[in-house]
């Protein structure tokens, strides 16, 4: 059985399921067969499809946000400004859907590669990237929930992930605590944990060390974003 | 626990999947619920309530003396005497002020002399003394005798002439003498008649006219003199005195004002729109800046039958003058004080009311946004009385209905709304 696993990589969908139900064994198999192309394609495809579904609602959200901005900055209240915002937001959403998964995975891979540069067995970036791609699977749940929620809501809020702690704040709440809550997304944290687990398997280091490393970086990032993000976003 | 998990088909994996599924479903449901809540337009609301509500008209006026006498100098004269002081109580007829009036006193004396002469002549004409009467009677008898004698002389001369004993000339002479004596007789008879019965006809009228003229001259002279010796025409108090002994009295301002300080009224002008709602006898609440803690009672006493145009800076204002009697006693108000008046045109009673901020007017129609089952409904209403903060609703709403205050322009019929907490506590009662 093990010989078979060594010779043939598991199907991508099986890996997807394994990541959720039996992550350690799945990552061990992925480390042996670091194929990420199809997985990233599927993830990107799901991301793009979900984005296209929510695009009309996103357009409404952007215009409403712009109208709120107009109250403090009347210079924005021009047809040209509206058109620019409408166009750029839609194009930006599609481009973002195409590249965000890959970029996120690349950043994660680079972070763990950096960690690997100072400790443990030296591994190529490609393997870290493959781990990051599969670790990205839980984030798709956020996307899925977002798509369903947006489809059923007249005035959806795109400013925070539907699975973040911001869910427990009143609508429109702002400030540091609210902004920090927006960063605390359970599926993203799950994804980080999976990436830490995969990386620990890859570089043969204790899970605790990679987990602490990545969560410290995430906490620093979240605090920075929370303190810098304007109230409206 | 391990045993329990082992009994579940699929074991730990199924449990994980189930948990994940439940988590996703829970997040979806919670997000949709939250978005719907957030999508409801936050609005300020107010309940339709019954309130005591009447109708008032507000005006600002000046306090005036109800009974007063203002004294002006008829001509620039020196003040001779001021026998009263400000604040002194005076009685009707009491001398208040004397101005220099020597010429007027002289004119009165002359008029009085003329009157005495005229009265004497008139009295003499109607009540002649005995001597005059005796002389007149004697003259009458003498004239009568002469007249009778002349008649006899003429008769005798006629007989003599017919017998040829007298000439034509002698007869004519006798007839001329008869005519002269007849005239004298008639004159004496008239004079005697006049002495016995008094003057008659035109002579009587002339005598009466002369006497009346003399009396009028005295009256005029007395009144003219009275202008310079001013007396109180009412009982009251000297409210102000703008003169002193030895000063030259000005003619363009009152030298003295007397009146009853307990008998005051307010004079004010009311705009045309409000004036039509005023009636005599309506209750008035009066407030004065001088007594901010007090409210005085009054009654509308007089409404002018015509409006007046008042010029204010560059604008014209049409106002109906009114007078309000101050009923409260010992108010401390002084003539000239400015007061604010609240005239109750409709007595307060319980009425269904909504705030002004809830009403939207389009042409002649008025409507409000009512919140029912979390949704906004546009409701046409008819309004009645207009209060300070609230408007009476005659039709379209019921008590305890919830209406939106300052409804947003983008509000649509059936749109979900949620009451927002009030921005500030309600300020003042109706």
Image (spheres, coloured by chain):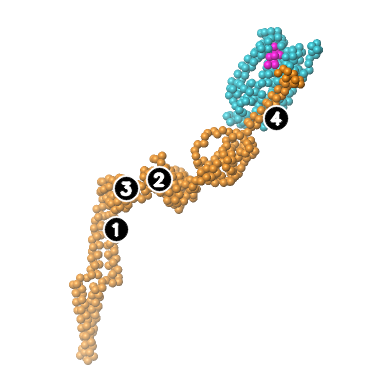
Chain assignment, label 4: A
Q: In this view of the protein, which residue sits in the foreground, B87 or A181?
A: A181
Have a look at marks 4 and 1 and say if they share a chain: no
In the rendered view, does B228 fall on the left or right side of B420? left
Residue B264 visible in the current orientation: yes
Q: CA distance from mark 4 to mark 3?
A: 89 Å
Say which mark, if any, is on residue B62. 2
Instruction: Name the spot of residue A21 as percent of width and height, x first.
Output: 73, 18
Asked if the magenta segment contains residue B412, the reply would be no
Mostly what secondary structure, the magenta segment? Answer: helix
Give the total number of marks visible in the rendering. Answer: 4
Q: Which residues are magenta?
A: A193-200
Chain assignment, label 1: B
Looking at the rendered image, the disc whose residue lies closer to the viewer, 4 or 2, is 4
As helix, strand or loop, the secondary structure at mark 3 comes to strand
State the residue position of label 1: B220
As helix, strand or loop, the secondary structure at mark 4 comes to helix
Instruction: Name the spot of residue A28 as percent of width and height, x first.
Output: 74, 12
Have a look at marks 4 and 2 and say if they share a chain: no
Looking at the rendered image, the disc whose residue lies closer to the viewer, 1 or 3, is 3
Residue B399 against residue A204 in the figure, above or below? below
- Colour for chain B in the figure: orange
Have a look at marks 2 and 3 and say if they share a chain: yes
As helix, strand or loop, the secondary structure at mark 2 comes to strand
Say which mark, if any, is on residue B320. none
- Colour for chain A in the figure: cyan
Q: CA distance from mark 1 to mark 2?
A: 38 Å
């Amino acid at each position: 059985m093990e010989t078979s696993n060594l010779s043939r990589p598991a199907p991508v969908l099986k890996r997807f399921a394994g990541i959720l139900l039996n992550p350690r064994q799945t990552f061990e198999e992925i480390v042996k067969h670091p194929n990420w192309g199809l997985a990233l394609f599927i993830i990107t495809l799901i991301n793009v499809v979900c984005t296209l579904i929510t695009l009309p609602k996103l357009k409404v959200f952007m215009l409403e946000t712009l109208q709120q901005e107009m109250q403090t900055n009347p210079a924005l209240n021009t047809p040209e400004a509206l058109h620019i915002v409408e166009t750029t937001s839609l194009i930006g959403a599609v481009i973002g859907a195409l590249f965000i998964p890959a970029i996120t995975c690349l950043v994660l891979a680079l972070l763990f590669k950096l960690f690997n540069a100072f400790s443990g067995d030296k591994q190529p970036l490609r393997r870290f990237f493959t781990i990051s791609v599969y670790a990205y699977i839980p984030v798709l749940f956020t996307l899925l929930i977002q798509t369903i929620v947006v489809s059923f809501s007249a005035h959806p809020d795109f400013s925070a992930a539907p699975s973040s702690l911001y869910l427990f704040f009143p609508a429109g709440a702002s400030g540091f605590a609210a902004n920090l809550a927006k960063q605390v997304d359970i599926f993203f944290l799950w994804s980080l944990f999976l990436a830490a687990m995969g990386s620990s398997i890859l570089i043969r280091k204790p899970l605790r060390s990679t987990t602490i490393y990545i969560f410290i970086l995430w906490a620093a990032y979240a605090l920075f974003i929370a303190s810098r993000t304007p109230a409206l976003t | 626990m391990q045993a329990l998990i082992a009994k579940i088909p699929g074991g730990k994996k199924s449990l994980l999947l189930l948990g994940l599924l439940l988590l996703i479903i829970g997040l979806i449901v919670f997000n949709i619920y939250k978005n719907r809540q957030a999508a409801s337009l936050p609005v300020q609301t107010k309940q339709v309530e019954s309130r005591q509500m009447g109708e008032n008209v507000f005006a600002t006026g000046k306090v005036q003396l109800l009974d007063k006498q203002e004294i002006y100098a008829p001509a620039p004269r020196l003040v001779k005497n001021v026998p009263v002081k400000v604040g002194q109580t005076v009685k009707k007829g009491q001398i208040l002020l004397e101005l220099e009036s020597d010429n007027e006193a002289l004119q009165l004396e002359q008029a009085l002399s003329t009157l005495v002469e005229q009265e004497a002549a008139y009295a003499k004409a109607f009540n002649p003394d005995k001597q005059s009467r005796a002389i007149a009677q004697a003259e009458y008898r003498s004239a009568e005798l002469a007249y009778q004698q002349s008649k006899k002389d003429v008769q005798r001369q006629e007989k003599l002439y017919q017998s040829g004993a007298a000439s034509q000339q002698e007869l004519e002479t006798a007839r001329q003498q008869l005519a002269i004596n007849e005239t004298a007789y008639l004159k004496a008879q008239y004079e005697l008649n006049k002495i016995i019965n008094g003057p008659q006809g035109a002579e009587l009228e002339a005598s009466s006219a002369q006497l009346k003229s003399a009396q009028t001259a005295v009256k005029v002279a007395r009144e003219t003199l009275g202008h310079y010796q001013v007396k109180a025409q009412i009982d009251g108090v000297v409210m102000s005195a703008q003169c002193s002994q030895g000063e030259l009295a000005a003619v363009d301002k009152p030298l003295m004002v007397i009146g009853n300080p307990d008998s005051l009224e307010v004079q004010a002008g009311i705009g045309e729109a409000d004036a039509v709602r005023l009636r005599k006898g309506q209750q008035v609440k009066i407030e004065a800046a001088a007594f901010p803690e007090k409210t005085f009672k009054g009654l509308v006493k007089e409404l002018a039958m015509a409006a007046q145009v008042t010029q204010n800076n560059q604008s014209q204002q049409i106002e109906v003058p009114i007078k309000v009697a101050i009923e409260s006693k010992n108010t401390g108000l002084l003539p000239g004080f400015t007061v604010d008046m609240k005239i109750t045109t409709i007595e307060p009673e319980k009425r269904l009311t909504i705030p002004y901020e809830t009403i939207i007017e389009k042409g002649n129609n008025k409507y409000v946004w009512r919140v029912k089952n979390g949704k906004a409904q546009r409701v046409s209403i008819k309004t009645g009385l207009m209060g300070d903060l609230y408007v009476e609703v005659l039709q379209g709403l019921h008590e305890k209905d919830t209406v939106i205050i300052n409804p947003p322009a983008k509000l649509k019929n059936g749109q979900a709304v949620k009451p927002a907490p009030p921005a500030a506590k309600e300020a003042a009662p109706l």
